[in-house]
Amino acid sequence: MTTNIEFQKAADLFPPLRDKCAIRLVSRLNVAREQVRVHKEKENEGFFKDLVSFFTGATTRRQNQINASLTDVVEQNVEDLSLVMESLANNSRTLGLVHDELRNIQNHTEVIGLEVLNLKDRVTELDARVTERFAILTEAVERVDFRVRAAHHLDRVIWRWKGGNLSELPLLLRCYSVYEDLWWGDFGFYIQQFPGKDADQLLSDLRLRIASCLAETIHALPTQRLSREEWLAGTAVGWQRLAPPLSHSVALLSDWADSVKTPYVSMVCKALPQDSGSLVVPHLFSAERLGREFTREFFDDRVVA
């Protein structure tokens, strides 16, 4: 069994884990929608089907299944999400994503049947709390120069790397941890909400600083091309060699990655065998290339949490 110490270490090395949990919990609330959709499809099959369902009791059984699913899925996830949100700081991206998802659920209130109205009230209450916190954050955005906060965030994560806080991770997983941290925090929020010249400059700074950190760590020039095996030293054969909480953390955080659309992130996080890597990832590449591709895959191609 994973200990609290192991969980804490994973959270220290991958700070966005708590945010990812909040998003995963709120997405589970949508599971109940599928039950309702199937039920409504049955209603549209006509009188004869309804009559057969009446005699066989299929409709009643289906409704009971819906009610049970709603009680089990919605109640538990609302409870878990409430607890997770209480423990979160006012993180820009996480609050925004949870706020949007709860709005979406509120717009589909047919998901929660009349038999579980108390759960609707709890979802509404949770939505009100998240909305209040999101409004406070929005006001703060208007008062504070968010570009400065984004730049400070970039400084902090780079110094975490340079200061050895990520030394327990293989080289490219250190790079991945930094990008996840940036994507979830003030840096990622600024890039998403305020596209333009300043955001492009921050991304350019990020590419250069990542290339510098990678080159410095591996003792090479930023433009020097090294083999995939050299870059993946300690990562190749799989991050399964990491302690289970860390490898599970990588798997959870990187579930958005796709070997076709985001081949570099997939190469690092999915531990692809060397002979089956995507052709778009060359055998030789430089720190400069890695910084450029990671930045593109996170801040241009990534669309989900």
Image (spheres, rainbow, N blue to C red):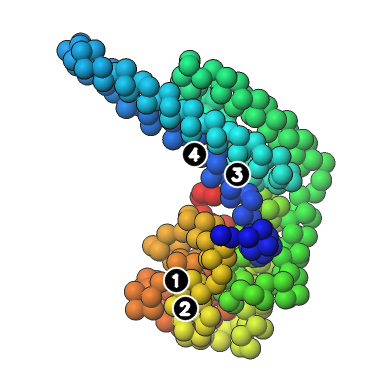
Q: Residues within 10 Å of mark 3 (few under 14, many from 20)?
A: many
Query: 284 or 167, which is in the foreground?
Result: 167
* Distance between the alpha carbons at the discs numbered 4 and 1: 27 Å
Looking at the image, is 96 positioned above or below residue 218?
above
Residue where numbered disc 3 is placed: 22
Looking at the image, is 28 positioned above or below residue 246?
above
* Distance between the alpha carbons at the discs numbered 2 and 4: 33 Å
Q: Amino acid at mark 3?
A: Ala
Query: 202 or 251, which is in the foreground?
Result: 251
Residue 196 visible in the picture: no
Residue where numbered disc 2 is placed: 236
* Distance between the alpha carbons at the discs numbered 1 and 3: 26 Å
Marks 3 and 1: in contact by CB < 8 Å? no
Q: Amino acid at mark 4?
A: Arg
The residue shown at (65%, 46%) is: 93
Q: Secondary structure at mark 4?
A: helix
Residue where numbered disc 4 is placed: 28
Left or right placement of residue 271 versus residue 169 in this view: left
- The disc, 2 or 3, on the residue closer to the chain's N-terminal end is 3
- Residue 272 in the image, given as x and y percentages of width and height: 40, 71
Q: Amino acid at mark 2?
A: Ala
Marks 1 and 2: in contact by CB < 8 Å? yes
Name the outermost residue toward the front: 1
Task: Name the mark on residue 271.
Answer: 1
The residue shown at (53%, 80%) is: 234
Residue 123 visible in the picture: yes
Left or right placement of residue 50 versus residue 279 in this view: left
